[in-house]
Image: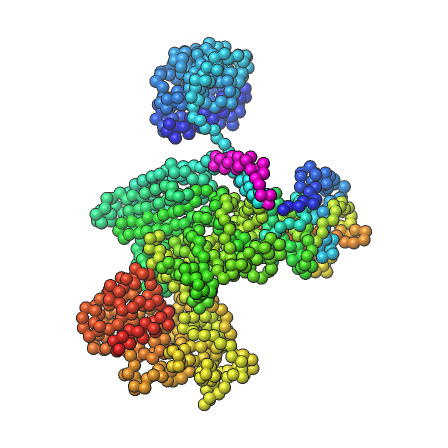
Amino acid sequence: MNTTVLDRAASPPGRGALTGDDGRDGQATFVTLTVADQLCGIPVLGVRDILGAQAITRIPLAAREIAGSLNLRGRIVTAIDLRRRLGLPDAAPGSVPMSVVAEQGGELYALLVDQVSEVMTLREAAFESNPPTLPPQWSEFSAGIYRLQDRLLVVLDVARLLALGPAPHGRT
Amino acid sequence: MDDLLADFLTETGESLAELDTALVRLERTPDDEQTLSLIFRLVHTIKGTCGFLGLPRLERVAHAAENVLGRVRDKQLSVTPEAITTILAALDCIKAILGALAATAKEPAGDDSVLIAALAATAEGRTPEAAAPQAEKAPAAEASTASPPAAELPAAELPAAELPAPGSPTAEQPVMAGPAPGNLAAAGPPGQTPPIELPAAEAPASEAPAGPQTIRVGVEVLEDLMTLVSELVLTRNQLLQLARMHEAQNNDASGFTVPLQRLSHITSDLQEGVMKTRMQPIGNAWQKLPRLVRDLARDVDKRIELVMRGADTELDRQVLELIKDPLTHMVRNSGDHGLERPEVRRAAGKPETGRITLNAYHEGGHIIIEVADDGTGLHVDRIRAKILSKGLATEGELAAMSSADIQRFIFHAGFSTAAQVTAVSGRGVGMDVVKTNIEKIGGTIDLKSEPGRGTTFTIKIPLTLAIVSALIVAAGGERFAIPQISVVELVRARLAADPQDSTTPLVEHIRGTPVLRLRDRLLPLVNLTDLLALHSEPADQPAQDERAAQGGQTERSVHVVVAQVGAALLGIVVDRVFDTEEIVVKPVAPILRHITMFSGNTILGDGSVIMILDPNGIARATGVAGGDSRGDGPKTDTATQAGRTKASTAMLLFRAGDAAPKAVPLGLVARLEDLPRDRIELSAGQPVTQYRGRLMPLVPFSGVIDPTAERHAVLVFTDGEGGAERCMGLLVDEIIDVVDDRLNIELSGERPGLLGTAVIAGRATDVIDIGYWLTQASQDWFRAPERERGPGAGLPHILVVEDSSFFRHLLVPTLTAAGYRVTAASDAAEALRLREDGTMFDAVVSDIEMPGLDGRALVREIRAGGPWAHLPVIALTSLASPESVEAGRAAGFTDYVTKFEREALLASLQQCLSAPVA
């Protein structure tokens, strides 16, 4: 069943606390995660839930990137395999993905990632737009890069990640 | 009480409550135009509705009040407390009358002339002082009428029927203290009348039958409730399952059992109750129709009577919303296309006024809605012409269809039969949209039409969409839900023949396509595992592995879910069938909506997510129903089942020569071979191969054999049997696919070896002429090996009567290749001319459905006498139902063979021809 390992973002008060000064003082808060050893961030405001291992029902005939659907407290959430979405090789067999649940157009989507790490507040000064040499599969979904002390963080554009298939943004 | 009246009371009650507040506001801010126009509009509405409902007394009072307000609005009268008081008095009078109406459903008798006079005086701008006392008298004169409402509830919208004694003040809101007779004159500045304790209040409350017992609730509230209840049902199911598991493990009933059962019952009751709140009479969806029909009749100059039956049949409001438009469209269609003009009707001996009948009733968990007209009925000929001109089917296919089948073409996209495109209908987006909308809510639609008698459309829809009963099945290690509404039955079938088990039906294959003999019909099958491509990935959940393993135990037998798709049946092959569960249908995420195989998803009792299969989508995807509910009506379903599946033809697609795909009816191909290059030898300059112990001539389609190719794909055509088998191989570049498609050939015949071009699987495809290639293989191909008796004349001579040139083109080479001399006739008349000319045949093979004289008439004519009277006559048809076979035999046919069953035809001919000889 559902094992919510990190449910801080789920309840509205918690969310408010986490985002505290978001947008002010030139700071922004992100949920950070790793996918194929790359550190990525998703704006915390867009994150509804963080889940551990889930029973995922395969959806036949769906796009490769769609891992299936899962039950989040009575709501059906479509799971998207972030590795496949980013054109990365599949995770090693046996590894258990975690999910970051985001909302888009009233629907919930779970992004399957290797590991969810922490919530970070970053200064705008450390932000840079995508370097032009970024490979297309990354530049399509990256909203920009943060320079951290020891590594780089790619800000994922959730809306674009979820623009799969014909429906959501009129893409066909 | 009359529904209309009840609605009126509820609505007017609301308006009056609003009016009271608004009037008081107006008194304070006389220049507030918005409030003024609101008041005017409310009073005007009340007046209008009263007139409509035939409530003269109410209307007169409201009218007088409206006059005053009208003048105020037109700035001819200023807002004075006195004027407001007078109007309030009028409102109270209205409330009192409404109260009596609610109690007795009749307008109470009484005289309001004094009040009306007061209002008139106010309207004319005379001193309100004069008017007010008059107004005061009015209520006083009829205590029961003009007293204020029982107002112990500030929010009470309706006055209690029995009124408090005159003089008891209203407690509604102090500021708008009612014009109780005693203090009317004092009701000057608002706010002065103190709220007074209301000793008499309880009495009216207890006595009052209290108006219509309804409240208005926002639809969203109900929707939310429904969602919550749905979730509750799911949680209940989950709990029950857990309890069952717990019990099974511990082998004793836990303390949970009783409260759980109680919870279960309450949940069920709650679910039912909430469902009820969503139920609305279907009449609500019909409300606009009388007006629509009236306007339509005027526009198209017809006389139309609309009869509505079963308007109180209730169904879920969501369903109601969804069928509203389709129904409107159908009624419009019936009026526009179905019914004739009065003069035409008179000439046909029918009453001048055409009738459209709407009928709704419950039938086993479904609602049946019929839309019937007594008009001309559907013109089969016109539809047929339209089908041909639109290229929706070929002549040959049409010939094989019953008129009911042809009529159902009106459900095809882009089909409109109105000769004239009118403003009303005929935009060509008619019935197909109706059908799609109805299928969207899990319903079906069918029609019955009799020339000159009219057309009846029958819609079958589920009572509700929110919770449906579904059958849970497993295929390829995954579970799926199939809505129970479309499940007709469950059948177990064997995959392989088993001598010990002769009762279980066997899955048979026609050229690789699985079918099942179900009683006396042939059921097309789709394998869910194949259809959903479930082989590809191994199940990665332990639970799924377990399920797959369980499925594996029964691998020699499968379960077939027989599903109703439109009027047709489809067998869905699954590995396992679990039980049924009540599920809450949730729409799939937008990024999955393009997968038409699923109608939604849901969460099962064990908490797992499961996809809900849409049999209509499956049928469309597999081409079983071709997207429309062809097949015959429910009663003759059996008859057309076979015919329907034949409407599309299995075609082998291959590539040879140029890039354009080529096609050949799969039925004509005996085998497919893949020959390595070194097996191709040359014999007297012709390529041959050793094939099953003899030499088989090979013909390269492109004219030359590609020397570089390692292997060659070969289509093998054979005839004869056993040792006498002859074969020929056609070398092609690549076998592409086998597809089931309608063969819609446009004959060109300009290139040798090609019959023409057809659109198959969405591409222009050349259909090859087998006869040509057979002669290419060997000039003597058509000379059967057993023809030792001498050339030509010794061969059995067959007459083929077939109106479709395409079938003629297929039959002639097939029969010729089988060693017969063949003469073809394109219709019965031509065949009979041959008889008159004295041509003799050994057998006749005739199509059934032909223009002019059909096959049955032809055989009767043949049997009637003359040289052909004793010839075997074989019927060739796509309608091989037991009934039609019987009818055919009665007409004189020797045998009945389904089109494209080459083997069956040859066997039948052999049998027919050997019988007289022996």
The residue lying furthest to the left in this view is B865
**Residue at the image point whose x is 46% and y is 15% from the top:** B203
Residue found at x 22% / y 72%: B870
Is residue B133 visible in the rendered image? The answer is yes
Quadrant in the rendering for residue B825:
bottom left
- Residue B697, percent across and down? 44, 83
Q: What segment is highlighted magenta in the picture?
A: B249-273
Q: Visible in this render: residue B415?
A: no
Work out which residue is located at the far bottom of the displayed protein and give it.
Answer: B684
Residue occupying the point 41% across, 28% down: B6
Question: Is A148 placed left or right of B290 in the picture?
Answer: right
A74 displayed left or right of B441:
right
Task: Please name whichever residue, B830 or B720, is drawn nearer the observer in this view of the structure.
Answer: B720
**In the foreground, B138 or A157:** A157
Question: Which color scheme is applied?
Answer: rainbow
Q: Is residue B357 magenta?
A: no
Nearer-the-camera pick, B303 or B819: B819
Q: Does the magenta stretch include residue B272?
A: yes
Q: Which residue is at a point 31% across and 52% down the rendered structure image? A: B449
Q: In which quarter of the image is the N terminus of chain B?
A: top left
- Main SS class of the magenta portion in the image: helix
- Image quarter (top left, top right, bottom left or bottom right) of the C terminus of chain B: bottom left
Image coordinates for residue B869, horizontal then vertical, percent: 21, 72
